[in-house]
């Protein structure tokens, strides 16, 4: 690939594009163009009122919004997604033809049943309550600090938690129950994906465990690069973890240039 691809960053649940700021700065300093859109209903301040339509949004609404944005971009694009963003990146790669796919702690597609204690323990304070799927959900502190920010320095975790926004309960339910839902809204047709991929997971991830990353890597077409980061949880944006992640992406992008 002679032309450097645009790097398209997709955030996850309860998050915003700001989580990518330092990562984008790294790649822009190395000559890449980057873009980091907000998922529908997420382009707000944590102190703003909850968008009225957020509770009704589906993961397919998120995918449709980003697909429309991507179709306006000319030239090669590498999709880079974290958590739910990693699942959305796969769903977009199913529909489009990206030059590459980078999945950081990706959420499970409908083909993967995440039977593990970590996700159940993490999400139980939300999912044990009837009707959560019809609401816009704040990020409970116990969920955040047990399953999202475990292993993150306390001051960084507090800062990031303070920036969390509301999330669609419908989307959480679609991802959590995707493998047993008749609607299968998180389905990925892996046969449609043609690009090289990089999958990075933390061995201590409690919400999208390494088993999900392994299962995802097995389903993706070759070539796939897979890496587990020891003693690392779900949040990959703090130092020194962030440097390890950007290094892996650097090497992956270099491999695309020589392919």
Image (cartoon, rainbow, N blue to C red):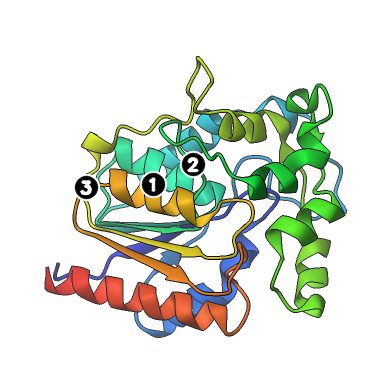
Q: Nearer the viewer, residue 10 or 32?
A: 10
Q: CA distance from mark 2 to mark 1?
A: 9 Å
Q: Secondary structure at mark 1?
A: helix
Residue at the top extreme? Answer: 182
Quadrant of the image occupied by residue 149: bottom right
**Mark 2–mark 3 contact, CB under 8 Å?**
no
Q: Residue 103: in sight, yes or no? A: yes
Q: Nearer the viewer, residue 79 or 114?
A: 114
Q: Residue at x 76, y 33 (%)?
A: 127
Q: Quadrant of the N terminus?
A: bottom left
Q: Position of residue 201 (x, y in %)?
A: 48, 62
Q: Residue at x 53, y 28 (%)?
A: 178
Q: Position of residue 27 (x, y in %)?
A: 42, 78
Q: Which residue is mark 1?
A: 215
**Mark 2–mark 1 contact, CB under 8 Å?**
yes
Q: Earlier in the sequence, mark 3 or mark 1?
A: 1
Q: Residue at x 60, y 34 (%)?
A: 176
Q: Which residue is mark 2?
A: 108
Q: Secondary structure at mark 3?
A: loop
Q: Which residue is mark 3?
A: 221
Answer left or right for 77 relative to 259.
right
Q: Residue 137: in sight, yes or no? A: no
Q: Earlier in the sequence, mark 2 or mark 3?
A: 2
Q: Residues within 10 Å of mark 1 (few under 14, many from 20)?
A: some
Quadrant of the image occupied by residue 153: bottom right
Comparing labels 2 and 1, the label whose residue is closer to the camera:
1
């Amino acid at each position: 690939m002679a032309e450097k691809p645009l790097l398209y960053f997709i955030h996850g649940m309860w998050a915003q594009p700001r989580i990518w700021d330092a990562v984008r700065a790294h790649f822009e300093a190395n000559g890449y163009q980057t873009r980091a859109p907000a998922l529908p209903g997420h382009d707000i301040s944590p102190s703003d009122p909850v968008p009225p339509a957020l509770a009704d949004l589906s993961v397919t609404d998120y995918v449709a919004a980003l697909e429309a944005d991507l179709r306006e971009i000319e030239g090669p694009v590498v999709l880079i997604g974290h958590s739910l963003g990693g699942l959305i990146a796969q769903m977009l790669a199913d529909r489009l033809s990206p030059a590459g796919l980078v999945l950081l702690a990706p959420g499970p597609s409908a083909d993967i049943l995440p039977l593990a204690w970590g996700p159940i323990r993490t999400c139980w304070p939300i999912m044990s309550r009837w009707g959560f799927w019809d609401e816009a959900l704040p990020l409970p502190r116990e969920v955040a600090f047990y399953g999202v920010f475990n292993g993150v320095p306390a001051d960084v975790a507090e800062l990031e938690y303070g920036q969390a926004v509301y999330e669609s309960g419908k989307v959480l339910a679609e991802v959590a129950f995707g493998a047993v839902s008749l609607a299968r809204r998180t389905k990925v047709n892996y046969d449609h994906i043609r690009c090289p991929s990089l999958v990075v997971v933390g061995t201590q991830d409690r919400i999208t465990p390494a088993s999900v990353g392994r299962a995802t890597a097995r389903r993706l077409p070759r070539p796939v690069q897979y890496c587990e980061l020891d003693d690392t949880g779900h949040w990959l944006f703090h130092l020194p973890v962030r440097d390890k992640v950007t290094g892996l992406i650097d090497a992956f992008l270099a491999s695309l240039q020589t392919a």
